[in-house]
């Protein structure tokens, strides 16, 4: 048996959920306790077995359609409900709901025509990438595979990094079209969350520190360096996403010139 | 609700439909009930969508999974009250995770158990933390929000559930 009371802590440690100080104490203990070390080994094996043999499921197309139909039906009822639907209105309820639908899409179309904001475009790109088969054009965790893949497809060569050691492995890259130009999209992972990094050359504009936006439950971070405009978007918690953005900015400034690299060291 | 509102809802929620179905599938343990739960949960989510948008820091995935989880537990209670009583029975439930209990010996003798079946046999509150962590990749904090229990409880439930699954794995390899 391992030391009672330690198992849950060890699990939390392996899950990356233990505070730094506790984690250090635990590591010290692990180094000198063969039983706890064996416990850790068994837990790692269990995790691998779960990953290999306990499947995540996919919602079938039939279920997707069923859900969408149900949602449309429900939202139509709600729209009708907003008109109050007293007896006199009842015969007009359907017409009214149709009018609301039509008005809604007309207004949406107008907004679109007036030009999507960049944040909208970035968010759209992220959501589209989450649909099956849209995530990467070049799926690879190797930055030396992903970076050259962009050659000849873009008029710039985007900096690509791998942060697997920090818990943000590179998953791949793809081409995307945002704000009226082709951009590089790099995909990173964090547990089951996906992070999209969109970037393109800065048109000699001023540099900005990161700004944060939250839309529809997604966080968007945005900043510009002397070379590139960066957008980072994910459903990951804001704190972790900011941590990731910090890694990216450090790596980028280290890579962008020897002077900057010296400054970091 | 206007169609732009519905479009926004769909853009936020539908990317997480696979995650929703996976959780529902493991909580209900069959495909048919899982689909019903997902549909009901999405309709509920639409109803509460106004309340979601303002919140900062809550991921859409965790938010939807909370609704799926509550829908699954609610529908089980409605449809099969006896089964639920049995599953939440204290003696059986601690037997499913603690090795000194006689129930565990019975389980062990029941030949080789696959890992998937071992997961199905866990009491629901243990099964859900495994699925939320290992398959959905939620943080302890997010799991605590979804399951409505403190982070400390998440931590101890996860650990006990893993110990039980590990036993099943060992039996499988040993037997």
Image (spheres, coloured by chain):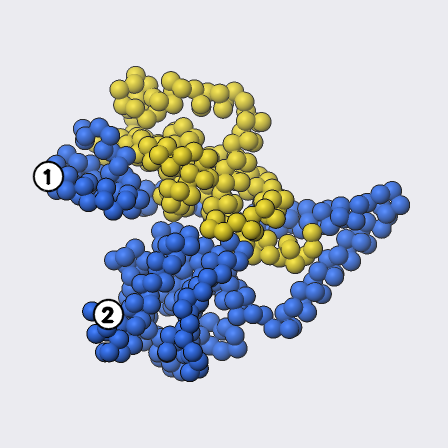
Chain colours: A blue, B yellow
Which secondary structure lies at badge 2?
A: helix
Q: Give me the chain letter of mark 1.
A: A
Q: Is residue B9 above or below residue A263?
A: above
Task: Give the class, few, some or many, for how many residues have Cα within 10 Å of label 1's Cα (few <14, many ≥20).
Answer: few
Q: Residue at x 29, y 64 (%)?
A: A162
Instruction: Read off the residue under disc 2.
Output: A264
Residue B43: x and y in percent read 61, 44
Q: Does A205 sit above or below residue B156?
A: below
Q: Secondary structure at mark 1?
A: helix
Q: Quadrant of residue A244?
A: bottom left
Q: Answer yes or no: do the residues labelled 1 and 2 have beta carbons within 8 Å?
A: no
How crowded is the residue under tag 2: few (<14 C-alpha within 10 Å), some, or many (20+)? few
Is residue A141 visible in this depiction of the protein?
A: no
Eye-nearest disc, 1 or 2: 2
The answer to whether residue A57 is visible is yes
Judge whether B169 appears above or below B47 on screen. Answer: above
The residue furthest right is: A88
Quarter of the image for the C terminus of chain B: give it: top left
Residue B143's label in the rendered image is: none
Residue ranking furthest to the left: A32
Residue drawn at x 46%, y 71% is A176
The quadrant where residue B26 appears: top left
Image point (31%, 63%), residue name = A247
| Residue depicted at x 65% and y 46% | A70
Taking depth in this image into account, of B64 and A132 the one nearest to the observer is: B64
Using the image, determine if residue B56 lies above or below residue B146: below
For residue B70, side relative to residue A109 (left or right): left
Q: Nearer the viewer, residue A84 or A136?
A: A84
Alpha carbon of mark 1 to alpha carbon of mark 2: how far? 36 Å
* Residue A89 position in % (x across, y down): 86, 47
Kindly identify which residue carries mark 1.
Answer: A32
């Amino acid at each position: 048996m391992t030391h009672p009371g330690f198992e849950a802590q060890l699990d939390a440690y392996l899950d990356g959920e233990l505070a730094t100080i506790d984690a250090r104490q635990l590591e010290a203990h692990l180094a000198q306790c063969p039983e706890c070390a064996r416990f850790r080994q068994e837990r790692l094996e269990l995790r691998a077995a779960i990953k290999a043999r306990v499947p995540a499921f996919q919602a079938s197309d039939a279920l997707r359609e069923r859900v969408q139909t149900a949602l449309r039906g429900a939202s139509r009822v709600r729209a009708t409900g907003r008109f109050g639907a007293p007896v006199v209105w009842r015969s007009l309820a359907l017409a009214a709901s149709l009018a609301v639908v039509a008005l809604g899409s007309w207004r949406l179309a107008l907004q679109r025509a007036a030009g999507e904001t960049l944040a909208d475009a970035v968010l759209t790109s992220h959501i589209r990438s989450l649909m099956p088969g849209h995530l990467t054009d070049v799926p690879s965790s190797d930055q030396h595979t992903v970076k050259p893949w962009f050659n000849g497809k873009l008029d710039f060569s985007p900096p690509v990094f791998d942060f697997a050691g920090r818990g943000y492995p590179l998953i791949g890259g793809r081409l995307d079209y945002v704000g009226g130009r082709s951009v590089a999209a790099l995909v990173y992972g964090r547990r089951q969350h996906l992070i999209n990094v969109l970037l393109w050359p800065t048109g000699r504009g001023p540099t900005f520190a990161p700004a944060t936006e939250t839309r529809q439950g997604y966080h968007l971070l945005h900043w510009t360096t002397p070379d590139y405009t960066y957008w980072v978007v994910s459903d990951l918690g804001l704190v972790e996403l900011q941590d990731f953005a910090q890694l990216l900015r450090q790596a980028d400034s280290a890579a962008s010139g020897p002077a900057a690299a010296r400054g970091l060291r | 609700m206007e169609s732009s509102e519905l479009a926004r809802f769909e853009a936020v929620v539908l990317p997480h439909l696979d995650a929703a179905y996976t959780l529902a599938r493991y909580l209900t343990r069959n495909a048919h009930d899982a689909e019903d739960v997902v549909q009901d949960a999405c309709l509920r989510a639409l109803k509460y969508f106004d309340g979601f948008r303002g919140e900062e820091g809550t991921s859409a995935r965790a938010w939807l999974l909370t609704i799926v989880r509550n829908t699954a537990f609610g529908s089980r209670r409605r449809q099969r009250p006896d089964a639920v009583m049995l599953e939440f029975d204290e003696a059986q439930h601690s037997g499913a995770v603690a090795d000194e209990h006689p129930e565990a010996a019975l389980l062990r003798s029941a030949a080789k158990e696959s890992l998937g079946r071992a997961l199905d046999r866990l009491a629901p509150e243990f099964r859900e933390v495994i699925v939320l962590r290992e398959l959905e990749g939620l943080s302890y904090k997010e799991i605590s929000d979804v399951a409505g229990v403190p982070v400390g409880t998440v931590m101890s439930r996860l650990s006990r559930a893993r110990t039980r699954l590990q036993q099943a794995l060992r039996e499988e390899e040993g037997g």
